[in-house]
Image (cartoon, rainbow, N blue to C red):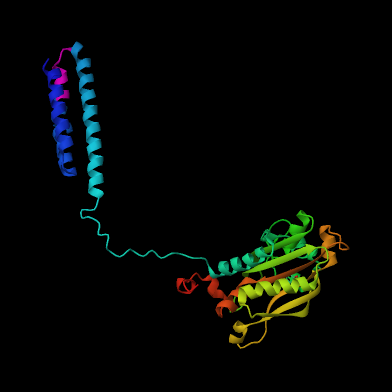
Amino acid sequence: MAVLDDIEPLKQSALAELRGAADLAALDQARTTHLGAHGKFTGLLKQLGALPKEARPAAGKAINAAKTEIETALAEQRLALEQKAALPREPTDLTLPGRRRRLGHLHPLTQVTEDIVRSFRRLGFVVAEGPEVEDDYHCFDALNTPADHPARDTQDTFYLAAPGRPLLRTHTSSVQIRVMEKQPPPVRIIVPGRVYRRDNADATHNPTFHQVEGLYVDRDVTVGDLKGTVEFVFRELMGPETQIRFRPHYFSYTEPSFEIDFASALTRKLGKTWLEIAGCGMVHPQVFENVGYDPEVWTGWAFGFGIERIAMIRYGITDIRRFYENDLRFLRQF
Ligand code: DAH
C-alpha cells in the first residue's frame, strides 16, 4: 500500500534534515517542510482518506507513531541549538580584570551590639530576649515603679488600643522580670533589644532606639563585681585606657543605684572628660520578692545602656537619626 510504504522513507528524511539543522532558523525551516500545514507528513495524513476503511486505523497509527518520533527529534535538536546559541561566541579572556561585586555588611548598630554581646559572652553571660509589646506589670510594677512614677506617664509610653492596654516596652529591664519568673537563680543574662518612647525625633532622641540590659544574680554578689564587669566590657568596647566612675543615682529597681560615666580618648575628642553612659545598681529586694527569689539568699546587679549612644560616641556621630535613614553614603562608612 502506497501510504504505508511512504512512511518510513519520509520519516528518515525528516529526521535527517532536523538533526542536520545548523541553527534555529534552519530547524524551523525543516519543521515547516515536514510537519507544517502543507508539509510532507501532513500530506501523508491527507491521503488516509483514500484508503479502504479497514486499512485506515493501522495506517493512522503508523503515521502518528512516526510523527511522534519526528517531534521528539525536533524538540531535542531545538534544545541543543538553543544551548549552543547561549554560549559566548568568543572564548573567555581569562586575563580580564574581575567584575567587582560590592558586599553588604552589618549596620553599625548591629556591629556595636555584637561587640557588646561578645564581651559579655566571654564572661559567661547568655543572651535573653523578651517581647517588645509588654504589659504594665513587667515594664513597671514588677520593677517596683509605682503607678504615680513619671516614667508611667502616657507622655513617655506608647500604649496600644487593645484589650488589657498593652504597651511598647520603654526599656529592656522588663526582660529581667520575664527571665527571673521563668528560671531559678543563679542568672547571668545580657539582653539586647529595641525599646520605644514617646519622644520627638531630634539629634539625640528617637521614638525607637536600642538598649542592652545585663542581669547577674547569685550569692554574695557585690558592687565591686558590677564595677569590674562594666570596666572590662567598656575597655574592650572603647579602648584599653577607658576609665569608669559610678555616681549615685535613683532607679526604683536597684538599691543602691548609680549612673556610669566613662572617660577616654573618645570623650576628650568630644571636649568632655566624663560622659554619662549607663544606669546600674544592686537589684532591689522588692524585685526579687516580685519574682519569687528569696532576697535573704540572693543578691545581684543590673545595668542598662543605650546602644545608639555608645555607637555615636565610638564613631563620632552627632545625629542619632542617621542610624535609621538607610542612606548608603552613611552606612558604607562602617
Ligand atoms: N532601664 C534604665 C533606662 O532605661 C536603665 C537601667 C538602669 C537599667 C539601671 C538597669 C538598671 O538594669 O539597674 O534608663
Q: Nearer the viewer, residue 27 or 101?
A: 101
To which quarter of the image does residue 317 belong? bottom right
Q: Residue at x 63, y 65 (%)?
A: 117
Q: Nearer the viewer, residue 268 or 252?
A: 268
Quadrant location of the N terminus? top left
To which quarter of the image does residue 211 belong? bottom right
Q: Nearer the viewer, residue 301 or 26?
A: 301
Please indicate whether residue 100 sits to the left or right of residue 284 in the image: left
Q: Residue at x 13, y 18 (%)?
A: 5
Please indicate whether residue 155 sits to the left or right of residue 206 in the image: right
Please indicate whether residue 124 sits to the left or right of residue 105 in the image: right
| Image: 177 above or below 53 | below
| Image: 226 above or below 191 | below
Question: Which percent across, then down, holds residue 11?
Answer: 16, 27
Chief SS of the magenta region: helix
Question: Which percent across, then down, holds residue 264?
Answer: 63, 82
To which quarter of the image does residue 193 belong? bottom right
Asked whether residue 155 is in view, the answer is no
Question: Which percent across, then down, holds residue 15?
Answer: 17, 31
Please indicate whether residue 13 sits to the left or right of residue 269 in the image: left
Q: Which residues are magenta?
A: 44-52
